Image: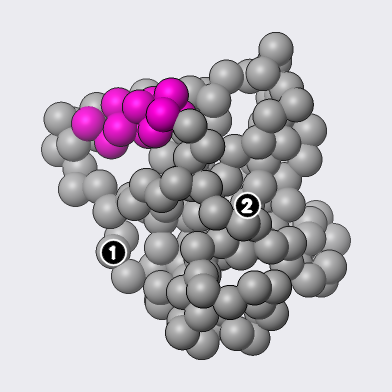
């Protein structure tokens, strides 16, 4: 199994779109990128902890490639929005990828360049992997547990 880390606004929607994607074994909501160890949701919501809402994707590389996950990431959120996602405004909702190695970074850069060539102004940031902190249990599988669908995320075929 391998892992990928994507921030695309509210982690509930990101988790929703990856949960049933081919080859994905689990999608876990959490936090990355801040300066506080083991942050709480309340800390992250202030924007002052520096964390982003992130989903940790566990996937089987024999069933899905990292590149396919990156395409899904870009096709399920507004990667051009600079201040959040939809109505969720704040630094914790920014678009970002936390890459584990240079190959993952190259794939992300490739797709940012493709999108830029298509005329998009890509706001997605790329960061080296840092510690991932799992979010509180009430954030996990939020839409599945509540019988709702994402309000900030939607699938749009691009590639």
Q: Closer to the camera, 47 or 78?
A: 47
Image quarter hosting the C terminus = top left
Q: Secondary structure at mark 1?
A: loop
Q: Magenta stretch: residue 104 in it?
A: yes
- For the stretch drawn in magenta, the main secondary structure is helix
Q: Quadrant of residue 149?
A: bottom right
- Looking at the picture, how far across and down is residue 73, in whole percent? 49, 40
- Which numbered disc flags the more N-terminal residue, 2 or 1? 2
| 102 left or right, relative to 134 | left
Using the image, determine if residue 3 lies above or below residue 60: below
The reply to whether residue 64 is in sight is: yes
Q: Closer to the camera, 21 or 110?
A: 110
Q: Closer to the camera, 72 or 110?
A: 110
Q: Magenta stretch: residue 155 in it?
A: no
Residue at 40% across, 73% down = 91
Mark 2 Cα-neighbour bin, 10 Å: few <14, some 14–19, many ≥20:
many
| 4 left or right, relative to 118 | right
The magenta stretch is 102-113
Using the image, determine if residue 51 lies above or below residue 143: below
Per the image, the residue denoted by label 2 is 55
Image quarter hosting the N terminus = top right
- Looking at the picture, how far across and down is residue 58, in whole percent? 72, 36
Q: What is the image's colouring?
A: one colour
Number of numbered discs present? 2
Q: Secondary structure at mark 2?
A: strand
Using the image, determine if residue 106 lies above or below residue 30: above
Mark 1 Cα-neighbour bin, 10 Å: few <14, some 14–19, many ≥20:
some
Q: Which mark is residue 82?
A: 1
Residue at 70% across, 12% down = 62
- Looking at the picture, how far across and down is residue 129, in whole percent? 52, 47
> Gap in Å between the C-alphas at discs 2 and 1?
19 Å
Tags 2 and 1 in contact by the CB under 8 Å rule? no
């Amino acid at each position: 199994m391998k892992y990928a880390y994507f921030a695309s606004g509210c982690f509930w929607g990101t988790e929703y779109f990856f949960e049933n994607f081919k080859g994905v074994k689990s999608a876990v909501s959490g936090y990355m990128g801040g300066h506080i160890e083991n942050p709480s949701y309340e800390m992250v919501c202030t924007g002052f902890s520096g964390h982003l809402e992130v989903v940790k994707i566990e996937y089987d590389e024999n069933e899905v490639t990292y590149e396919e996950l990156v395409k899904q990431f870009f096709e399920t959120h507004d990667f051009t929005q600079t201040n959040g996602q939809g109505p969720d405004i704040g630094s914790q909702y920014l678009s970002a990828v936390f890459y584990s190695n240079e190959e993952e970074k190259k794939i992300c850069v490739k797709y940012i360049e493709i999108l830029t060539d298509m005329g998009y102004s890509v706001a997605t940031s790329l960061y080296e992997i840092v510690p991932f902190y799992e979010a509180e249990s009430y954030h996990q599988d939020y839409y599945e547990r509540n019988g709702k669908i994402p309000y900030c995320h939607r699938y749009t075929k691009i590639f």
